[in-house]
Amino acid sequence: MTKSPHYTLHYWGGIPGRGEFVRLVFEFTETHYKDPKKPAPLLSNTGATSHPPHCAPPILELSNGSYISQTANILAYLAPRLGLDGVTEGMSAEDADVRRAHVNQLVLTICDLNDEAHDVHHPISNRLYYDDQKPEAARRATEFRSWRLPKFLSYFALVLRENAECSNASGANAPAYPRVIGTKTTTADIALFHVMNGLEHAFPKRTAALRQDEGLAEVWKLVDGVREEPTLKAYLGSKRRAEFGQGIFRHYPELDGDE
């Protein structure tokens, strides 16, 4: 009998952070994983992880003792193993490779938005406190709210609208909410939900205003649909889910606004 693979996620405790992308994928698929929340001993330590060394968490420890890091890279590794790569029965090998590349392409773009959201409150340096860069953060927040965030959301709305495979599905094959590619949930759908959920915490006024934009309706349908997935809904309502606060998505009222 082949043993099921087991995974250990190494990420900081107390915050969702970049590790949450991986947790949500495990939770959605009901994949067992360990989460010791003590990554420090693995950083730049080839004695613990072998080569290559790892610069920052999240780090995923695999069944065979190997380690991989970088959020999008971890998701790309897990996607085909957990059925979240968008590949469907009957696809050629080449088409399947392209589908996985497209899913990863979207995940990378979502990670770009994630990073820009972080840089609103730390626009100068991660080494400095927020209070040390407030004027710069205020200026960055204005640009993010008025330009960068709408640009990203308009792009994802386009991705969702142009997904003919999903919009043309009917009957039993019609999904309950839009997907970014194909008709099946992928790591990109889950990643987009996570970032939007974080943005709702960090910028409640701005995201509430953007919900009223009919051109972005598909984005919010996906967000609300993923939120209601039974396995994720149970996790999001549990004590195992770390609350937003410190970390990437921080709510500073002075950085939020309707526009």
Image: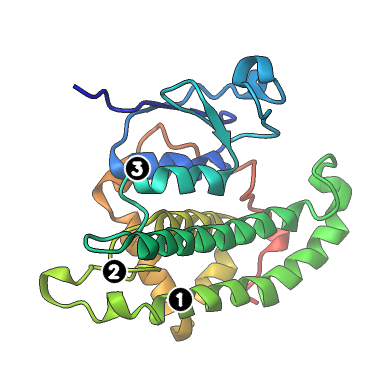
Instruction: State the residue in front, 226 or 107.
Output: 107
Which three-letter amino acid code belongs to the residue tagged 1? Answer: Val
Bin the neighbour count of mark 3 within 10 Å (Cα to Cα): few under 14, some 14-19, many 20 and up: few
Which residue lies under the disc numbered 3?
A: 81
How was this image coloured? Answer: rainbow
Which quadrant would the N terminus be assigned to in this image? top left
Q: Residue at x 68, y 54 (%)?
A: 252
| Visible residue check, residue 236 | no
Which three-letter amino acid code belongs to the residue tagged 2? Answer: Tyr
Please report contact status of discs 1 and 2: CB closer than 8 Å, yes or no.
Answer: no
Which quadrant would the C terminus be assigned to in this image? bottom right
Which residue lies under the disc numbered 1?
A: 159
Q: Which one is in front in this view, the residue at disc 1 or the one at disc 2?
A: 1
Instruction: State the residue in front, 207 or 51.
Output: 51
Who comes first in sequence, dot 3 or dot 2? Answer: 3
| Rendered image quadrant of residue 154 | bottom right
Who comes first in sequence, dot 1 or dot 2? Answer: 1
Which three-letter amino acid code belongs to the residue tagged 3? Answer: Arg
Please report contact status of discs 3 and 1: CB closer than 8 Å, yes or no.
Answer: no
Which residue lies under the disc numbered 2?
A: 177
Instruction: State the residue in front, 203 or 92.
Output: 92
Cα separation, mark 1 vs mark 2, equals 14 Å
Image vertical order of residue 96 relative to residue 29, above or below: below
